Amino acid sequence: MRPRAVFEGVCPNCDGRISDVRLLMGIPCEKCLPMPDEELLKMLKGMSKEEIMSFCARKLEEQGNLKKYRELAELHVKLADFEDFFRRALGSPPWSAQRTWAKRALLGKSFAIIAPTGSGKTVFGAIMALYLASKGKKSYIILPTSLLVKQVYERLLSLAERSNSEARIACYHAMLSKKKAEEALKAISEGDFDVLVTTSFFLARRRELLSGLRFDFVFVDDVDAFLRSSKNVDLVLVLLGIPPEAVEKALELLRLKRELSRLLRSREARGEQLDALRERVAELEEELNAIRSKPDRGVLIVSGATIRAKRTRRIRLFRELLGFELGGRAEGLRNVENVFVSPENSVREEVLKLIKELGSGGLVFVPLDKGSAYAEELAEFLKQNGIRAEAFTRTRKKVVDAYVAGDLDVLVGVASFRSPLARGIDLPTRIRYAVFAGVPKLRINLSLAEFRPHRAIILLANLRDLLSGGEADRADAYIARIRHYSSLLRRDELREVVQALVEGRKLSGFLERVRGFFDEVWSFLRELLARPDVVQAIRESPHLSFDEREGEPFLLVPDPVGYLQASGRTSRLYAGGVSKGLSVLVIDDEKAFNGLVRALRWYAEDEEWRPLGDVDLRAVMAEVDRDRETIKRLLSGELTLELKDPMKTALLVVESPTKARTIARFFGRPTKREIGPITVFETSTGDFFLSVVASKGHVFDLVTRGGFHGVEVLDGHFIPIYGTIKRCRKCGEQYTDDLDLCPKCGSKLDDKAELLKALADVAKEVDVLLVGTDADAEGEKIGWDVAVFLAPYVREIRRVEFHEVTRRALMEALRNPREIDERLVEAQILRRVEDRWIGFELSQKLQSYFRKKTLSAGRVQTPVLRWIADRCRKWRRSLRDCFGLTLENGLKVVLRLPRMTAREVSDTIERLKGATCEVRRVEVEEVELAPPPPFTTDAMLREASRKLKMGAKQVMALAQELFETGLITYH
Ligand SMILES: [Zn+2]
Ligand SMILES: [Zn+2]
C-alpha cells in the first residue's frame, strides 16, 4: 500500500512525520514502530481498534519509546476495566452514550449530560461512583428528593453486591429513623464512606458538615432542582477542590465581562477605560486557565432530561471554572401525527366524542383568546358526560398526581407557550394524545394603549403580507431590529424602556436609542391600523380575523408556537428515539386554521396535516402505546438497551463555526464546551448524541521547505508533504513550516495543530466520526485530512454530505452516510501541487522578466490568459464598420461592412446618400422566453455587480453566510 501523503508533526506517539497509511491503520510512525507497512498490515488484519492499540503500546514499550501513545492506550485499558465492572454490576454492558460519559470522567473532564428519559444517566452515575470507590476514591451523588435518595441508595447496595464491591455507602434522607439519621450524620462528618448520597437540599442545609470534605467525583441528578439554591454551585465547586479564591475570581471575571459588554453597547465609554477593563479581563482569564488546568480537582457531572434553569451568573461559573456550559432541552424533536376535523355539531361535542374514542391519558387545550374560564367550563361539561376531567390552569401537584395515577382521564388547559399545561408537564409514559378545542390563537388589542416588543413583532409579522412592497420591507426591518434590541437588553432594562415610552419620558444613552426606536415602531403600527385600506385588507385576509369586545378592537392571529408547545407534550425524545404522539385539532374558525397551517411552516418545516377521516386512529394509538410501554420498561430497568439499536455518540466536523452553531440549534438549545480553541456544541438528533465542531477551513497545506515545493519523491512516486497551517494573528499571512513567530511582521502565530489536538480530544470520547465538510473537492480534501488525522482516535469514520443547512438535509445525510471519495481528494491534492509547480514557478519568471515583485501567475489563470489573447486576436479580425441609415419612410437600418480606410469610409458615405432600398419581407414573430435558470456563481456575481454594485468578495461572503444559515442551497 503506497502512501498518498505524509503529514508533519502528527504521529500519535512522537508528534513526528507520518504517512496517511499509518494514520488510517491507527498506528505510530515508522521511526516509532520500524516495521514495513505491508508486514504490519498483515499482522493487524482482523484486529479491533482496541486490540491494535494494545499491540502498538506493547511494541512501543518493548522498544522503550512509548510516549504520547501511552495516554491513548491507557484510556482504553481504563475504559475496558470500567466496562467490565459495569457488566458485572448491571449484567449488561454500557451503551454508546454511557461509554462516552465514562471516557470523559476517566479523562478527568467535567460536563453536563442533557439526555432523554431512559438513557441510563443515574445508573451510570451510581456505577461510576462504585467503580471509583474500588480505586480508593470518594464520590457524592446529589438527588432532588428524599424518595430518590432512598431508591438510589438501595440500587447502589444491590449493584455493589453484584460487582463484589466493598464500597462504604452513606446516605441521608428524610425517611431515616432517628437513630439511622444520627449514624449517617456521624459517618458524613468523619468522612467515613466512599459514596455519599443526599438531596440537594441537604447540601444547602448542612454545608458546615461537608465543608472539610473533598470529592473526586460529584454526580448531580436533576440539575434544575440542584440549581434552585444558587449557593449550591459554589458549595459543590469547593467540594471538588477548587479553592474559594478561584470562585471569587471567576465571579469577578463574570462581573467585568458584563461591564465590558455594557460599556461597548453604550458607545459612551472612553478608550482608556475600555483598555483597562480588557486588560483586567485577560489577566483574570489567564489566572483561571492556570487553575482549570491543575489536575488535582474532582470531576463534576450535572445531568437532566431537560434544563429550564435560568442562566444566572452562578451557573456561568461552570463555564469559567470547569469549561462547560449548560444547554436546554431537545425541543426540535417531535413525532406527532397532526390531525384536523370540522365538528359535526359543536366543538365541545366533538371533543367529547374524541376523548371517548381515544381513552385515558389525554390533554385538552382551549384557545388562549377564550381563556381559563372556558377551560373550566369545558372540564365541567366533560365531567357531566362521564369523563374524569379536571381543569389545569395553574400548577397543582395533587391534580398531576391523580392524573399520573390514572384517577383522572384528561386535563384541560390553555394552549399557549406560557400555560402550565403546555409547558410545565413532562409525563412521557402517561400523556398519549392532545385534543385542541379550537385553533390556538392570540388576541392582540389593537387600541395599542401600551407597547410590548413581542406583541409588536407578532403584529408586524401578520400585517406585513397585507402591505405594499416598501411598507412590507419596513415591517421586516422593524421585526429584525426589535429582536436585536430585545436580545441586548436585560429584562429590567426592557421594562424601564417600555415604561418610559408609555409615560412619554426620555432616557439616556443606549436605552434612549431603544426608546426612540420603539416609539417609531409604535407610531408606524398606530398609523397602519387607523388606515381604512389596512382594516379592509384584514377583514378580507384568509388568515386573520377582527373581533370587537366592549368597543375595543382585537386582532385574532394563529399561534403556531403555542400549538407546537402544547401538542409537543405527546412526543418525547427517549433513549430509543422519539416517541409517537397524536394531536387532533377541532376547527372552530376556518380562517384561523388556514393561518395556523401556514404559519407553522416557519417554525417546523416537516409538519403535515391529515383530515380525521383519512387516519386510522386505532393504528396510530397502537404505535403511541407501544412507545409508552418501551419507555416504562426502560425506566424500570426491565429493558436493557442492548436489545435495541440505541443512539450512538458521534463527532460531526463541518468547516465553518456558523454552520456548526446553526446545525446544533436545529434540536433546541445545545450544550456548549470550550476545548482549546474550539467550541463543541452538543445535541441529540434522535439517532445520535452529536458533538458538532468546525475545522475553520483547511487544517493542512503543503510545506514549503523540503522537496520540490513540498513534494518529495519516494520509491519513484511523488508524495506531497503536509504541515499544519499557521496563521499570523496580525497580518493574516499563512505558513506551514515550523515557525515560532511570523517572519513578515514578528507577531504570534495561531497553529491549526492546537485545533487538531482539541479535535482528537473530542474524537477519543465518541464512537463515530462524521465528516460533514462542504460537498466539493476542497471540502472532500479537508474532510479527508480530518479523517486521516483522527483515525487513530475513533472506531468508525463516515462521510456525510448535505447541500443545504436545513434540518431535513442534515437528517437525510446522517441516515445515508458514504465513504470519502478518494478520487475527489486526489483531484484536490493535484490542484494544490499545480498551484505550486505551475503557478509559483511561472510567477517567478513573470517577476524576473518584468522586474516587479507584485506580479503573479496562477495555474488556471495562465492558460486562460492564453485563450483570452487568442479570442482577442480573433475578435480584432472580425471587426466591421457600421453605417446607420434612416430611410425616407423613417425605417432605421444598420449596414455592416469590412473594415476600411478613412478614405473608403467617406466614399461609401457619399455612395449611400443617393441609394434606394427595397423592402422584401415583413414578419411578426412570437417568442416564448423561459424563466432564467437558478444562478450560477458567475451569473450571480455579474448580476450583483450590475444591479447592486457589489464586489465579488462581498457577494461570495454574503452567499456563504446565507448558505450556512440554511437560507439558500447550491450544488
Ligand atoms: Zn512517531
Ligand atoms: Zn505577520
Image: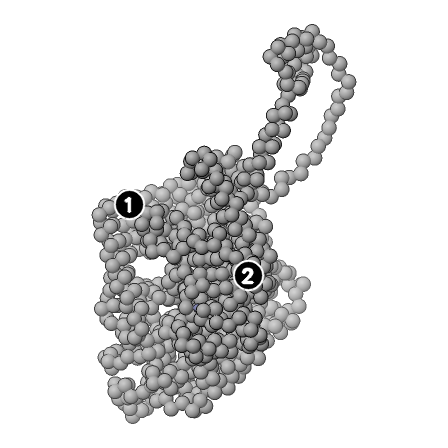
Q: Which residue is mark 1?
A: 267
Up-down relation of residue 79 to residue 897 (above or below) = below
| Residue in the image at 28% along x and 45% along y | 267
Q: Determine if residue 394 is in view.
A: no
| Residue in the image at 28% along x and 66% along y | 290
Q: Which element carries disc 2, helix, strand or loop?
A: loop
Going by the numbered disc 1, the residue's amino acid type is Arg
Q: Determine if residue 935 is in view.
A: yes
Locate the N terminus and report the quarter of the image it occupies. bottom right
Q: Which residue is mark 2?
A: 715
Q: Which element carries disc 1, helix, strand or loop?
A: loop
Whole-Å distance between the Cαs marked 1 and 2? Answer: 64 Å
| Residue in the image at 44% along x and 52% along y | 704
Pointer 2 local density, CA inside 10 Å: few below 14, some 14–19, many at least 20 = few
Label 2 CB less than 8 angstroms from ligand 1: no
Going by the numbered disc 2, the residue's amino acid type is Asp
Q: Is residue 915 left or right of residue 783?
A: right
Front: mark 1 or 2? 2
Up-down relation of residue 520 to residue 230 (above or below) = above
| Residue in the image at 55% along x and 75% along y | 44
Nearer the observer, 697 or 11: 11
Q: Is residue 529 left or right of residue 356?
A: left
Whichever of callouts 1 and 2 sits on the residue coming sooner in the sequence is 1
Up-down relation of residue 465 to residue 644 (above or below) = above
